[in-house]
Amino acid sequence: MTGHEALDRLRSAAAAVGRPMAFMEVCGTHTVQAFRCGLHSLMPGNVRLISGPGCPVCVTSQGDIDMLIELARRPGVTLCTYGDMLRVTGTDGNLEEARTMGADVRVVYCSLEAVKLAGAEATREVVFAGVGFETTTPATAAAALEAERLGLRNFSVLVSHKRILPAMRALLESGQVKVDGFLCPGHVAVITGYATFAPIVRRYGLSCVVAGFEGAQIAMGMARLVELVRDGQPALENLYPQVVTRWGNRRAQNLMRRVFRPVGARWRGLGSIVDSGLAFRSRYARFDAQRRYELTPVESAEPPGCRCGDVITGRCTPAECKLFGAACTPVCPIGPCMVSSEGTCQAWFKYRRQDKAGVPAGAGSN
Amino acid sequence: MCLAVPAQVKNCDGNEAIVDLHGNRVRVSTVLSPEVKEGDWVLVHAGFVIQQLTPEAAAETFAVLADLVEKGGPP
């Protein structure tokens, strides 16, 4: 199906429904791609796609970021991180600044690079920043298992991994955001399987449609979400069968379960959510950097005036934040949503900056 | 961050494989997808093969990536 056909179906179903509808995506790649292909301006006026807590950099709590920066500054520590985290601002600077001041911060593409580094530099304490959703978590689990196999004593992980389903539930339970369905993340579903979203359909009567990342695929996902509203039949659908299966990558799931257990975690904008984070199981506790370095997570305040927490929960658009485009830009970002290349604020700045007023997000639809 | 890219497996070597990732030869881990073999199309995320692909699915994803490269965007 082409993008045009998808948009025709979307418009016809939206006209049949009539009332305003809002759908939420929970994936940074969907956020960026929807902006890039101009989907927001192509959709009928009564259909909105709002960004949810889908960018791992953006949802990481201020306390976790502070802990990461504090750790990087310790003598003897080499902090390995994915590039996305480098410029996220903590209470006192960011990792890039810490590196300028002498901290040993290295960007890795793969968690196993950090393990190799620990093997090669026995005098350094190598810490890997474990950030990301279910797509990325198996890579961290595999790194811990490799470090165990090699008998490394100088490797650990600061775990900030998140699970998307508990966050979607918490958002719905909060009652602060009303959505008519979810555009579900294709690559998280590669690992978890699309069945993972079934509880949202069952418990909340909201459709979940897994979609790929091409403009036409996202448009098709939106068309199906609106059609399901029109038909009054909430459903779980997989529109990305090329790579997503019902039960996902079992091997990756088993690795995650072997190494980690679900624990409560703090999210920016959402607070603490039961079972939404991961911690090492006791067998692998020696790889837990938080334990090894006796770090206590603190509830640090977010930057003054920053509304990233509201942006990633669909409660406001970037344009409604006073800092947006003035004090906070991609060159001098204040909040993580402007730092991350997948952040809603950065995407909005790049593609919708002239649209200052924006459309109030999360204003409710029913 | 959850961006995954298609690649074609060139050589398998234990828990690792050399894949052709848009013209680059990259060493990736196959511990999450050990059944892959030479010639397979796969989805790579952060240095790990996370799924096997049909050649058609790989071509579709390349179209998206070409779009990203052309217009600038996340790596």
Image: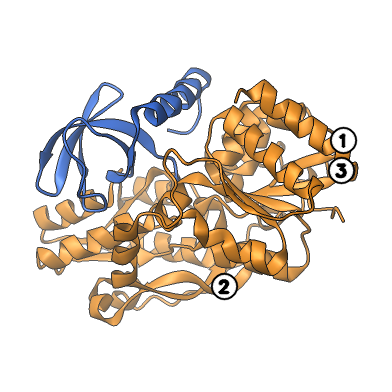
Name which of mark 2 and mark 3 comes first in the sequence.
3
Residue B28 in view in this figure: yes
**Could you tell me residue A179's position as x and y percent?**
76, 55
Q: Are marks 2 and 3 in contact (CB under 8 Å)?
A: no
**Badge number at residue A15:** 1
Q: Measure how far apart labels 3 and 1 are at the Cα level.
A: 5 Å
Q: Are marks 3 and 1 in contact (CB under 8 Å)?
A: yes
Q: Quadrant of residue A126?
A: bottom left
Colour of chain B as rendered: blue
Picture layout, residue A282 above or below residue B59:
below
**Badge number at residue A1:** none
Picture layout, residue A324 above or below residue A53:
above
Residue A128 in view in this figure: no
For mark 2, does the 10 Å Cα neighbourhood hold few (<14), some (14 to 19), or many (20 or more) residues? few
Q: Chain letter of disc 1?
A: A
| Residue found 35% across the figure and 62% down from its top | A253
Q: Are marks 3 and 1 on the same chain?
A: yes
Q: Is residue A76 left or right of residue B2?
A: left
Q: Are marks 2 and 1 on the same chain?
A: yes
A208 or A349, which lies in front? A208
Q: Chain letter of disc 2?
A: A
- Label 3 is placed on what type of residue? Val
**Badge number at residue A17:** 3
Q: Measure how far apart labels 2 and 3 are at the Cα level.
A: 44 Å
Q: Chain letter of disc 3?
A: A
Q: Is residue A123 left or right of residue A22?
A: left
Q: Quadrant of residue A269?
A: bottom right
Name which of mark 2 and mark 1 comes first in the sequence.
1
**Badge number at residue A299:** 2
